[in-house]
Amino acid sequence: TPSALKADEAGQAADLTLWVRVALDVPVQGLFDYCSATIIPVGTRVIVPFGRRKLVGVVVATPAQPAIEPRLAKAVEEVLDDTPPLPADWLRLASFAAQYYQRPLGEVILPALPTALRKVSAYQGKRSAGGPVKRMDKRARPLAGSVGADTPPSLNAEQAAAAQAIAGQQGHKTIMLHGVTGSGKTEVYLHAAQAVLARGGQVLFMVPEINLTPQLEQSLRSRLAGIEGGEMLAVLHSGLSDGERLRAWMRAQRGEARVLLGTRLSIFAPLPDLGLIIVDEEHDASYKQQDGLRYSARDLAVWRARDRNIPVVLGSATPSLESWNHAETGHYQRFTLAQRAKAVELPSVKLVDTRRLAMQQGFSPQLVKALEERLEAGQQSLIFLNRRGYAPVLNCASCGWVSQCPRCTAYTVLHRAGARRNYLQCHHCGFQARVPHACPDCGDQDLKPMGRGTQRVEEYLAELFPSARIARIDADSTRLKGSAAALFAKVHAGEVDLLVGTQMVAKGHDFANLGLVGVLNADAMLFAQDFRAPERLFAQLMQVAGRAGRHVKGGEVIIQTDYPEQAVYQALLRHDYPGFAQYGLAERKAVGLPPYAYQALLTAEARELSSALGFLADARLLPEQHPLDYPTVAALTLYDPVPLRVVRVANIERAQLLVESTSRPALQAFLTTWSHALSGVAKAFRVRWNLEVDPLEI
Ligand code: ADP
Ligand code: ZN
Ligand code: ZN
């Protein structure tokens, strides 16, 4: 801040050296002090020498005295003033994230910047052209306020109440928008956003994924059109080129973009006039970054909104139990959209008890009959199966051999790619092998695929319904750029009768003519995972069920299960999220799981499992060995180190240790001390480790 600078100037009147404290992206704890002949404002990017290298860093403080011996200090080499200094609130957000997620500040700040802004080569050396921004065209700042190109539907009473509350909210508040699928949450967001834009604020609109839901971008663009061709909108996600990302970032920072639509990484965009944050599908796991800085963009959004004293909206049909608990206890204000916006009812959900049924290729007679009826009625159906490939494993009937990845403790999945091109692939490490002609162990030629994935389901449906037009949408069928969009376009154009898909089809799509959703193998999702598995399954099934009957009457969802009495399925029958949440929270409370406890996960990776486990065992002993360093140990539980479920991936063995506390501050204080001591322990075991705060998967 300017006043801090003045104080520094005064303090240094006698000695004309100025000091800057710089954050660098290096795997060393701490910040680095350099001297400078000129005043450099906090938030400025600089090029500094570091060892033999030169690095781009960010000035985070201007101390009166350096923390090192002054005569050893090196000088700032270049001040990068091609962008305005990073604003103070942005730096606060970064410092909070660094502290909370236990990472050095430089490892948060630098990776959050677009690549071009943190590369020395963009400024110095042969390739430079005086910095990346110089080459960008400057655009005039459009006038805010005059939004509204197409005519939006008039809001119903529930929508209006929510939109008004958000639009009228002065100061911070976290607002939960709980609306069933198709209840028109987007309309509420848009109305609230328009009010904020009209009073000169910027809006950060976060979505889990952009590529899969182009509809939202389109409706935002058309709603904001009329102002320099929709230039008010900037879009930020990881699929952009470096140049596109830089441009969106700069437009946000300069205030030219008034609405920033983005995925999780957009939480780190500087937005000088930020007036509202929207987090759509707030429960979605995509908001969690799974490597590097393992942050939750949803949680950071709530923190940033509080810090900026502005409202934040968390929208979902199936909120996370963490957020729901906050609403139940009054920390969040909740608005409910209980009805679908259009005059169509929610689809009816049926459970087919598969325990005593004669199944054909995973299909119950009931589901086959329902598919026939929809085909006859000229409606589309979706078969949802969260497993790609042809079959999850190949098996020898004579000796019991199964296709296994040589590098992982996992099966290889059979993929069909035409006559002689079938292959086995490991979904953990990518390993590929040809399908053997005979069993490698006993030589028997009768190798059989076990279980089924989307390819096999597609094949079976083609047998059952030879005249139906069938499409499959999963990671395999959409590998080529643009192919997902092309497949979805075919579905929308009515050129598909039966659609087979993984979770890729569950999100956000509004299929006009879809009457039936059939769910295969849901039980696998219920039992195969951690304590959040039922919550995830419920959300996923609600979401996929929400694809049915959005426009046609009599929409229907058929879930095949061996466990129809499970709470998840019973709540789905009634579309009863609150009932499910109540049950789920009670269960968590009884055993002391989040949101009634806070967790951190220490993961270790090594060539030998014994090293990974040894490191974790020693890490676990640290508080006992150094009791004076750990004043809060009493409120904590450190569990036994255990191997991961899939213990070996790509020849690396993995183990983890869970830390839990009923007090977030106690956990935080412990982690800060602990994480600083872990590097020392890791050296002895030659392991790679990472510490994850609020892990989603355990
Ligand atoms: P959600 O995001 O809650 O699942 P959407 O925002 O996609 O639901 O809305 C579902 C459909 O209802 C969309 O086609 C939308 O244009 C329409 N819609 C939203 N609000 C209204 C309204 N007040 N009147 C009529 N149609 C509406
Ligand atoms: Zn065999
Ligand atoms: Zn593998």
Image: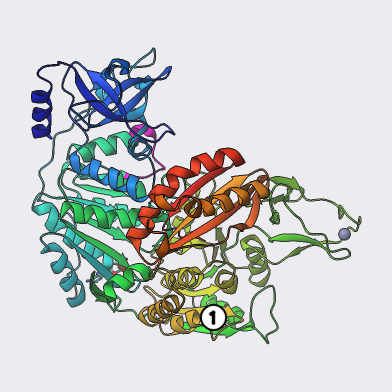
Determine whether, in the image, residue 509 is placed left or right of residue 87. Answer: right
Determine whether, in the image, residue 460 is placed left or right of residue 42. Answer: right
Q: Position of residue 600 (x, y in %)?
A: 45, 57
Q: Position of residue 596 (x, y in %)?
A: 38, 71
Q: Toward the viewer: 281 or 3?
A: 3
Q: Which residue is mark 1?
A: 373
Q: Is residue 510 above or below residue 584?
A: above
- Residue at image position (17%, 61%) is 192
- Residue at image position (78%, 51%) is 435
Amino acid at circle 1: Glu
Q: Position of residue 687 (x, y in %)?
A: 59, 42
- What secondary structure is found at the residue carrying circle 1? helix
Please report the bounds of the magenta region as a residue range. 236-244
Q: Answer with the quarter of the image where residue 242 lies.
A: top left
Q: Is residue 41 above or below residue 301?
A: above
Determine whether, in the image, residue 133 is placed left or right of residue 310. Answer: right
Q: Toward the viewer: 663 or 482?
A: 663
